[in-house]
Image: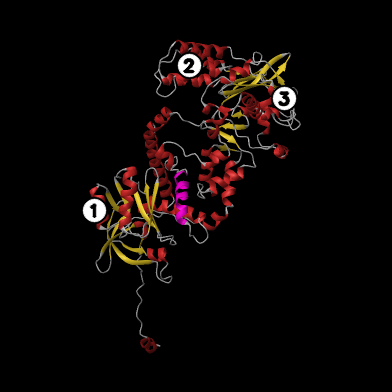
Amino acid sequence: MVREGIVLGHKVSERGIEVDRAKIEVIEQLPPPTNLKALRSFLGHAGFYRRFIKNFSFIARPLFNLLAKDTPFVFDGSCLEAFHTLKKALVTAPIIQPPDWNAPFEIMCDASDYAVGAVLGQSKDRKHHAISYASKTLTGPQLNYSTTEKELLAVVFSIDKFRSYLVGAKVIIYTDHGALKYLLTKKDAKPRLIRDKKGVENSIADHLSRMQFEETSSLPIDDYMRDDTLLKVTTSQPWHADLVNYMVTGYVPKEVDKRKVVHDSQFYLWDDPYLYKLCTDGLLRRCTPACEAPQILDRCHSSSYGGHYGAYRTHAKIWQSGFYWPNIYDDDKEFVRRCSRCQRQENINPRDAMPLTSNLQLDGIDFMGPFRKCGDKEYILIAVDYVSKWVEVLLCSAADSRHSIRMFYDTIFPRFGTPRAIISDGGPHFIDKRFKRCLAELGVDHHVATPYHLQTSGQAETSNKQIKNILQKTVEAMGKDWVSKIHDALWAYRISYKTPIGMTPYQMVYGKTCHLLVELEFKSHWAIRKWNMDLQSAGIQLAELEEWREKAYHSAKLYKEQTKRWHDKRIKIKTFKPDDKVLLFNSRVHLFGHGKLRNKWEGPFLVLDAADHGAITLQDEDGKVFKANGQCLKVFLEPEMPQLEEVDVYELQGTA
């Protein structure tokens, strides 16, 4: 049987929870920091065990003062003393014992002019054993409270902070402010036992209340559960109840496999009142109960930033938002499969019929529409970057070159600079002289796609399709509000995971993930613990952005090569050579539905030249030469009629 082990950097044994000596030995050998980076590294290591160090913020105050903005780095005697005191405190850190649920809890709380502090503990053999420390900086109107009000606020804060321990248990509160005893003797007061304790005896909470630290280092958890709903929740046991009970109390029911619970607990972190799972990518994700899972699925799939994507991308959005529960992907697939709007709008994607070729780093541009007229808007001009998959749109009243030029001058050029090349179809709005002159002046190469061959400008067509699918599933039945929904569709598209680049377009452009409303609503780990206001860290993150883009470029290249190999294995390769006769697929019949009784294939045409990348030069019966993509062609087989011998029936009658 395992007597002790390391769980998330802490040593857990039958004695309680203590620091990991292996980590402390590393800190003991550290020399005094000589710059801000080394100081932040030391405070990060030491702060990991701040729950074991009494007056941690008070001891480390000289070191934290050096982190203030525009403060010169002068490591004086007070800083050196704080540095050595912290190292010594880590070596002699006490053991925090688990609570005894049969004994009453004791809370020692106190308030100062700028903070409140509290200690949760229990008395065993006339000795006080600490269970947890808590403190909070006063902000806003709280700073103007009277002394009595601040002391009472300390009581309220401590009860709210340690609520998960106190529900259903006897509680004794110690305070050095005698007036509070009389405030709680009213008839309508809660049945809590208050004892007056002198400030000298209440030293632990007294020191905690006089610490000064950044508010962001200890954000209070918003506990929205009401007392009258507690019994209703406990009737439906969450899937992680056994894990939480073991991590908090060390108790495992007899009917549960204790070895499995102990083994699994090393991958979880209990941060009252939530349980987090340490995933393989190194991120902490909140363990979500079954009652919240459908709401999270609905937000990440059907909301304005959901976009009604498929199961894979919806799962990626939940994953990046910081939530976890068992069978999350199976639940996601079932939810998407039963989505009413998705069932009405799903399309069947046709298979490609020619070997794929590598794409260049280009920007694609195309018009969508006409849509139902909303104001004076009928069209959407969409531009997509082939590397980051980032999409920009312009709402237009007409599909003309004026709006094409406006898209580049108002959106593309001022925001992202001049692209090396663009791909568009052969519409009059893109081959207009003014549009060509605009691109030529800026040195942008313009490539025109093959008519009625969507794969030539595949990225723009793919983005068009996805934006259109999102709009179809989010606008009202008559489609009158598509203008107001286009920005939500863009948001959903930009923050959705793209397999070719291995991240979202938003992360590719801005160097960080886009935090969603669902993270704040259901309190993911980032929302309550990682409100990052460190400008230097943000600067380092921006410096790494170029490395991300290089990685995304190689990821997209590898993805396209793998897709090409997979695609080419599943098709029958078509080859054309000069003097072949071929038939050309009539795309107008397929795209516009004209003439249902007309032939879908036209020709035959004579092949004059066949390029390596699918562009075939053809000649019709009148001698007109044009180009077409090999996907739209198939070899024409000449009919071979047998030569019949002519027989004169009269000669047959004569011979008869």
The quadrant of the image that shows the N terminus is top right
Which one is in front, 445 or 182? Answer: 182
Disc nearer the start of the sequence (1/2): 2
Which one is in front, 602 or 364? Answer: 364
Q: Is residue 420 left or right of residue 206?
A: left
The residues tagged by marks 3 and 2 sit, at their Cα atoms, a distance apart of: 40 Å
Q: What is the three-letter code of the residue carrying label 3? A: Tyr
Q: Give me the residue at 40% from left, 88% from top.
A: 656
Q: Please tell me in which quadrant of the rendered image residue 555 appears.
A: top left
The numbered mark at residue 437 is 1
Q: Is residue 235 above or below residue 200?
A: below
Residue 506 point in image, percent of width and height:
43, 41
> Which residue has dot 3 on it?
182
Q: Give me the residue at 58% from left, 12% from top.
A: 92
The residues tagged by marks 1 and 2 sit, at their Cα atoms, a distance apart of: 64 Å
Which of the two discs, 3 and 2, sits closer to the camera? 3
Q: What is the three-letter code of the residue carrying label 2? A: Pro
